[in-house]
Image (cartoon, rainbow, N blue to C red):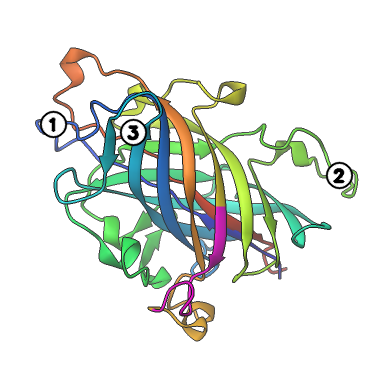
Amino acid sequence: MNIKKIAMAVTLGLASFAAAADPITSVTGALEIKLGGLTTESNRTAGTNESTWGVGYLSTISSFNTDSSWTAGATDGYLYYMIYGIADQSIIANNTNGFDIYNIGATGGVADGKIHLDLYYSPTKIKAIDQFKNANPGDRTGFDSYSAFAGLGPAFLKLTFGQGIQSVDRPETVGIDESLATMVQDVNAQTLPASGSGRFFLDVVGGTDAIHWDTNTRAGGHDMSGNFTLRPNFGADNNPNCTQAQALAGICFAGLINDPILTARAVPEPASLALFGLGLVGLAGLRRRKSAK
């Protein structure tokens, strides 16, 4: 079985917080978003060819042009995300790290052919995700839901991965067009745990603060772009709170990812300043995996 990995990203919830002040109202223009995430091949959605999914958190949002920034914490709250619907398009051996993995959106069952990243805001810290990093993949409650995010309200942002990150088709595969991939990874193994890197584009498709993030400022008219690194989520050098046995058994998430996402956030209209907006999209490292035949 081939696998793919995914890292995650972040999100801020809103709706019932319409009267609260936006914790990142002053953070606009060209931004760098830093995040971390956990990925797994366990508890994938039945009836689909999903290979990997995960959860994650946002740590900071910083402006390239001003001193303004947002940092997760008790004052401004926390941003978490779920990434799901990742499927494998092709895996090709390379001469650098080991394998080039091309990812597309999962199909079949409840899947819609897209890789999704949903962001939520939480007033409290979810330590199992961002501090201990020992969250349980078994707590997934649906294709697009995870128990730790229950009750956080509608997503602050809903994003999907967009085409264009791979500009050419690979001649090694017949009948598969890698230029349609929406995430590309360079990893040292076809299954988790693995180490490597990846890149992607993101497009805003919904969420309570979508209007301020749907700016089309990245290459190809996308809203966000990112690069990530990934490594195993266990052991003293990575995460002492999870063992390799726990990761392989699906008790801990097997993959750990981080690195920044680049985007821009529009200045809110005066009437919208009362809305709880938060913007962010973390993304994550992913590795891909071929579904069992």
Q: Residue furthest bottom?
A: 245
Residue at numbered disc 2: 175
Marks 2 and 3, how far apart in space? 36 Å
Q: Residue at x 40, y 37 (%)?
A: 158
Give the mark nearer the N terminus: 2 vs 3.
2
- Judged by its main secondary structure, the magenta piece is loop
Image coordinates of residue 277 in percent, x first then y, are 24, 31
Q: How many marks?
A: 3
Start-end of magenta stretch: 229-240
Q: Which quarter of the rendering shows the C terminus?
A: bottom right
> Would you place residue 179 above or below residue 133 in this image?
above
Quick one: 17 or 130, which is closer to the camera? 130
Q: Nearer the viewer, residue 149 or 190?
A: 190
Q: Is residue 50 visible?
A: no
Measured Cα–Cα span from mark 2 to mark 1: 52 Å
- Residue at figure coordinates x 33%, y 61% from the top left: 130
The Cα atoms of the two marked residues, 1 and 3, are separated by 17 Å
Q: Position of residue 237 (x, y in %)?
A: 49, 75
Residue 6 appears left or right of 26 = right
Q: Residues within 10 Å of mark 3 (few under 14, many from 20)?
A: many
Residue 145: quadrant of the picture:
bottom left
Question: Mark 3 belongs to which amino acid?
Answer: Gly
